[in-house]
């Protein structure tokens, strides 16, 4: 049986780009960026739309640019 396709309009995930330097931010915020897989400015990653990822984005959102996938 083929896998179910998501309905149109639903978000499969996020495209997250690091826009500002984490220099001078709290150590916990830098660890969140590492957890998201972001190391360099202008680096982009794709992450699933989960509660954990949304919480991480909320914590360091001032450093990021987030777009739905």
Image: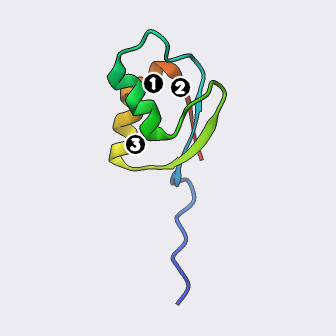
Instruction: Say what secondary structure mark 3 lies in.
Output: helix
If you read the primary sequence from the N terminus, does the residue marked by circle 2 or circle 3 appear first? 3
Q: CA distance from mark 2 to mark 1?
A: 5 Å
> What residue would you read off at disc 1?
61
Q: Position of residue 2 (x, y in %)?
A: 56, 85
Q: Position of residue 57 (x, y in %)?
A: 42, 32
Nearer to the camera, 12 or 55: 55
**Picture disc at residue 32:** none
Q: Residue at x 47, y 39 (%)?
A: 36
Q: Position of residue 50 (x, y in %)?
A: 38, 50
Instruction: Say what secondary structure mark 1 lies in.
Output: helix
Coloring scheme used: rainbow
63 to 69, vertically: above or below: above
Answer with the quarter of the image where residue 35 lies: top left
Nearer to the camera, 26 or 2: 26
Say whether residue 41 is left or right of residue 25: right
Answer with the quarter of the image where residue 30 lies: top left
Binning the other alpha carbons within 10 Å of mark 3 as few (below 14), some (14 to 19) or many (20 upward) gives some
The extreme bottom residue here reads 1
Binning the other alpha carbons within 10 Å of mark 1 as few (below 14), some (14 to 19) or many (20 upward) gives some
Binning the other alpha carbons within 10 Å of mark 2 as few (below 14), some (14 to 19) or many (20 upward) gives many
Instruction: Say what secondary structure mark 2 lies in.
Output: strand
Q: Residue at x 61, y 28 (%)?
A: 40
**Picture disc at residue 53:** 3
Whether tag 1 and tag 3 are in contact, CB under 8 A, the answer is: no
Q: Residue at x 46, y 31 (%)?
A: 33
**Picture disc at residue 64:** 2
Q: CA distance from mark 2 to mark 3?
A: 13 Å
Whether tag 2 and tag 1 are in contact, CB under 8 A, the answer is: yes
Q: Residue at x 63, y 24 (%)?
A: 41
35 to 60, vertically: above or below: below
């Amino acid at each position: 049986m083929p896998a179910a396709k998501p309905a149109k309009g639903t978000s499969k995930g996020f495209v997250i780009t690091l826009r500002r330097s984490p220099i001078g931010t709290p150590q916990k915020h830098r660890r969140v960026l590492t957890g998201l897989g972001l190391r360099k400015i202008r680096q982009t990653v794709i992450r699933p739309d989960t509660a954990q990822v949304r919480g991480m984005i909320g914590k360091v959102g001032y450093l990021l640019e987030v777009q739905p996938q």
